[in-house]
Amino acid sequence: MKYKSVIWHFMKNRMKKGLPVCWPAGDIENLFRKAKPIYKELLSKMEGISDNNPMASNITMSFVIISVWLASDRKITPDQMSRVMKIALDWKLMKAFAGSIDLNTEKGIKSFGKMMKKNADWASGHPEDSNTWDFNFDESLHKDGFYYHFTHCPIASFCNKYGYEEINPVLCDIDHVTMAMMHSKLIREHTVAEGAGICDYWVVGDKIINPK
């Protein structure tokens, strides 16, 4: 995959907000200088997925997190990195953009479903991206919200291949944070990263009590 400076600088600027909780403020710039070549190397190792994939940003953004963690010589613990990312993602502009989809409404559910199915259609039409997420939908499984699942995650596979399993939970947890921005909660019982063979996404409005 190609290095894109806009992704690097966006993630760097956001992560700088949270890194002081676990890293000396005066050494954060040096941490990113060390992380940048690691980031580029990670991108060069990712195979079977193209930069044109609509979900490619999930990889390029996750790799910034992994590169910073590796640049710290893994001294930043996964729990600490989770705190960093919660602070990094606590941004009004991002919340406003994501919040335009409200999963408490029928319109919001349809918009979210349309977005996911568009990604699935892209994957189906580009078999050359053999390492991408596989979308599986089941609208009969739940009455409330929207459900889909993956049986393959290129990020989890990459981390497992190169010995970065420790950071996987941090990357998975971001799903909960971003879903919350859409006035929703993610109900998940399994992840590919933990070896379950499936990442299930049941997304329901955050105002729904006892979703069915």
Image (cartoon, rainbow, N blue to C red):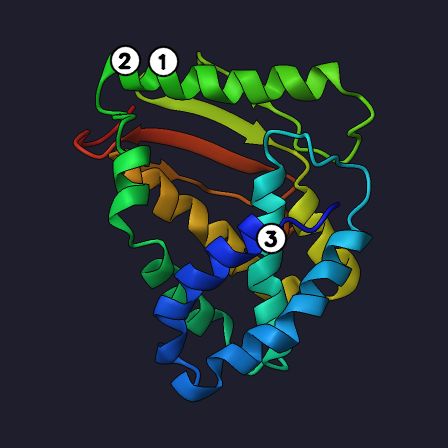
Q: Is residue 92 above or below residue 115?
A: below
Identify residue type, mark 2: Lys
Residue 91 is left or right of residue 26, and the answer is left
Tag 1 or tag 3, which sits nearer the N-term? Answer: 3
The local secondary structure at tag 2 comes to helix
Q: Position of residue 46 (x, y in %)?
A: 77, 49
CA distance for labels 3 and 1: 33 Å
Can residue 149 be seen here? The reply is yes
Can residue 137 be seen here? The reply is no
Is residue 112 or residue 7 the one in the foreground?
A: 7
Could you tell me if the residues under marks 1 and 2 are in contact, i.e. CB atoms within 8 Å?
A: yes
CA distance for labels 2 and 3: 35 Å
Q: For the point 56% across and 82% down, which residue is it?
A: 30
Q: For the point 69% across and 51% down, which residue is it?
A: 3
Q: Quadrant of the C terminus?
A: top left
Give the crowd class for mark 1: few <14, some 14-19, many >=20 residues within 10 Å: some
Q: Position of residue 126 (x, y in %)?
A: 76, 20
Q: Position of residue 199 (x, y in %)?
A: 56, 38
Residue placed under numbered mark 1 in the picture:
110
Residue placed under numbered mark 2 in the picture:
107
Q: Quadrant of the N terminus?
A: top right
Q: For the point 59% across and 80% down, which residue is it?
A: 72
Identify residue type, mark 1: Lys
